[in-house]
Amino acid sequence: MRKHVASRLFTKAPLACFMLLLFGAARLKAAPPGRRGDLGATGRFWHITDLHLDPTYHLASDPTKVCFSSKGAAATGAGPFGDFLCDSPYSLIQSAFLHMDRLVRPQDFIIWTGDSPPHVPVDELSTEIVIQVMSNITQTLLQHFPNVTVYPALGNHDYWPQDQMPTSTNDIYEAAANMWKPWLQTDALETLRQGGFYSQLVHSGLRVVSVNTILYYGPDKVTTNMSDPAGQFEWLEDTLKRAEQSTEKVFIIAHVPVGFMASFRNTTAIRKAHNERLVDIFRAYSHVIAGHFYGHIHRDSIMVLLDQKGKPVNSLFVAPAVTPIKGVSEVYANNPAVRLYLYDTDDFGILDIWQYYLNLTEANLRQRADWRLEYTMTDSFGVKDLRPASLLKLGLSMWLPPASTFDTYYTHYMAGTSPSSSASFLPSPFRLHAPPALKNTHLPAPQSLPQHPPPCSSQLVVSHFLSEQTAAAADANPEHSAPHPTQPKHKQNRTRERTRTEDTSQGHTCAAGREAKTWQPG
């Protein structure tokens, strides 16, 4: 996840409009670990992502020698379950699976959106080591959940050298297909071997489509000038068309998400042209797609896909990571997290999120991993479900003063943290998020808010629900502004600009406060 490439603001028309929602947690009581409840016609599935196992992690007298993933930085808060400057020790991953094991039901399934190896220099790994780490995680999942199907997606670290995902059969695609045979059927394994993607029916009416978005990832030099790497766009359209003909609904899973990155203005994680093509496909088959599920960012965020008329048509979810790692210069980190989704078994719309986390500092001090319920989405934000219309309405409410949900988010977002002490994480019962850089959007004035904002056909607009007031707060407190997850501050070339884009085709103006950036891949 640690390497990124920048992309300038999109100008090719037409493009979908997104609203990106970064959700913090309101304080709530944790559900008993064994709570079941009568959910009626409700299905469930788990989401794990970005485990990043560091096999070198160990407690050492020299804090610079605790883990290779700290890259020589002193892991002064190291304990039995990890450190915020290190990737996951095996004990942390085991604790996450043990927590899930107590709650999982036979009808549940798991989506696993990639990135098993650690964030270490390329010469510390090899194809063999990457395969071994992936195999270790796979075997651990099989041991904990022998009767639960897992649907994996490949991440940018699930290859060596990292990010350089090829467009044809290779040792890692072959190894993945072999180790995931207990979960995947023959036709799924065939396309996995060929291009790192697959489709499989979960049960009658519901299909998982695992997209290899690393083929579109900026640092992947192998696919730089390819319009359709590995023929995945053609395959995806054909798969969605067949699902439509079979009256199936589809869950899209992938590692790198579409749209802008959660923490930075106008920066996409995948290339501009590929992002536009994916958006076009997803919008065309939005009536077939019941939800999107991604990882890579390590942060908890949600997006809403609008069609060309501004109607909300898809909900997109980015899950927080299991690994707690942060860069030395980053102020904020995430505590380890896993989540449970609830969905309607009639139309497969997403109903709720139950987000679980581990207070890492507390776990290390107590020598015990007490995973807790951080929040449930519907209770924390007073929404009836997580369908696109509900999420868009919630996002728009953040723009209306007084935005109490925004204030709650921002309060907990900043609570109990400092740039120098991992012990500062202890007072907060909430998993923390890296502070986003923010930009305004094309939304009309609060006094004249429509049911949904007008579309911007001239650009892809991703808007954090955290508004310009948060950007102003960050500007006033520069110590609260974290650098890009993969880049030290000296590599950032930042310019601030205020822009108005005239959208003559739609007869309205899209206004955006933007922070343009260029990056050197880390």
Image (cartoon, rainbow, N blue to C red):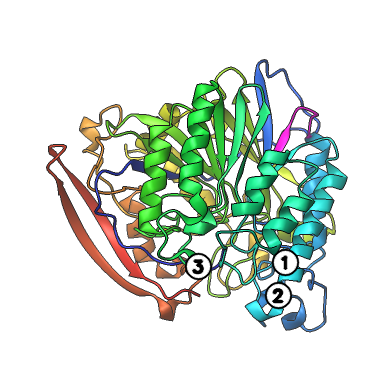
Residue 95: give x, y in percent of width and height: 81, 51
The residue stretch that appears in magenta: 104-110
Q: Earlier in the sequence, mark 3 or mark 1?
A: 1
Mark 1 residue type: Val
Label 3: which secondary element: helix
Q: Is residue 241 left or right of residue 377?
A: left
Q: CA distance from mark 2 to mark 3?
A: 19 Å
Task: Give the label on residue 513, or none.
Answer: none
The percent position of residue 339, horizontal first and vertical second, equals 66, 41
For label 1, count other residues whose C-alpha is less than 10 Å away and answer few (under 14), some (14-19) or many (20+).
many
Pointer 1 residue: 130
Give the image location of residue 334, x and y in percent.
Answer: 61, 57
**What amino acid is labelled 2 in the image?**
Leu
Residue 222 image label: 3
Check if mark 2's residue and mark 1's residue have beta carbons within 8 Å. yes
Task: State how many labels appear.
Answer: 3
Q: Nearer the viewer, mark 2 or mark 3?
A: 3
Which image quarter holds the N terminus?
Answer: bottom right
- Residue drawn at the location 42% of the way across and 76% of the way down: 520
Horizontal and vertical percent position of residue 350: 55, 29
- 142 lies left or right of 494: right
